[in-house]
Image (cartoon, grey):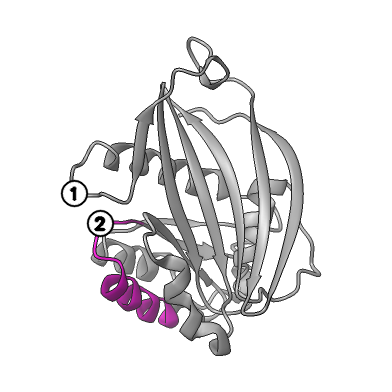
Amino acid sequence: MKVVEAKIVVLGSQGVGKTSLVVRYIGKMFSKHISPTIGASFFTCNINLEDARIKLQVWDTAGQERFRSMAPMYYRNANAALLVYDITSANSFAAIKGWVKELQSNVPEPMVLSLVGNKCDLQESRAVTQSEAAQFAASIGAAYCETSALHDQGIDQVFLNTASELLKMSSSSLVSSLRSYDSTDTDEKLPIGTPTEEKATHTGKVELPALNADVKLGELQKSLCC
């Protein structure tokens, strides 16, 4: 079975819901009381896709301006990025252009980009139209999706699409930072046919200049089909 190991960074302004998206996907939970990320949180998850397993290292970065200078340290050697904005905040959407420029200047290899409009459950307060966002996504070669961490809408599709594109990219000789190999371990083999429930271990790590704190999120059963 083919195994692809990739690094994905989650970027965007403070308060757009980056951490809520990641925790909703990996932990299948939502909390209205998530504190702002300090530095970056690190998670891992496995996605079974076709005849391969995509092992993602998910880096949830801090959106606060005072941590902006630390960002390049986290997205170095990244293979994919989720560019998250709040559909009710035009400023958060405008800020995405700055993140794209930083990625382009700091990550020399091709990346899988996804523009994610979060909080689509707040349609009555929408400040960014779908057509405007879709047009911008097309201009930077990114996939576009709207999500709701509150209602768990669209998030699985974002990660599944990213995993699918990373699988395609793994066949390219242009991306040296994307690790790909064939596994012969019996516990790595997928069942014949459609992937079924597979265990994925998820851990989190908050990194600070002078402090490390580990957070165990335990094991999670995840089933994803293409």
> Local crowd at mark 1 within 10 Å, few (<14), some, or many (≥20)?
few
Q: Residue at x 30, y 77 (%)?
A: 101
Q: Main secondary structure of the magenta part?
A: helix
Q: Is 191 placed above or below 84 here? A: above
Q: Residue at x 29, y 38 (%)?
A: 168
| Badge number at residue 71 | none
- Residue 113, x across and y down, in percent: 36, 58
Drawn side of residue 110 relative to residue 131, left or right:
left
Q: Is 196 placed above or below 28 here? A: above
* Residue that mark 1 sits on: 174
Query: Three-letter amino acid code at disc 1?
Result: Leu
**Span colored in magenta:** 94-112
Toward which corner of the image does residue 219 lie, by quadrant? top right
Q: How many marks?
A: 2
Drawn side of residue 12 relative to residue 101, left or right:
right
| Badge number at residue 110 | 2
Q: Is residue 162 visible?
A: yes
Dot 1: element: loop
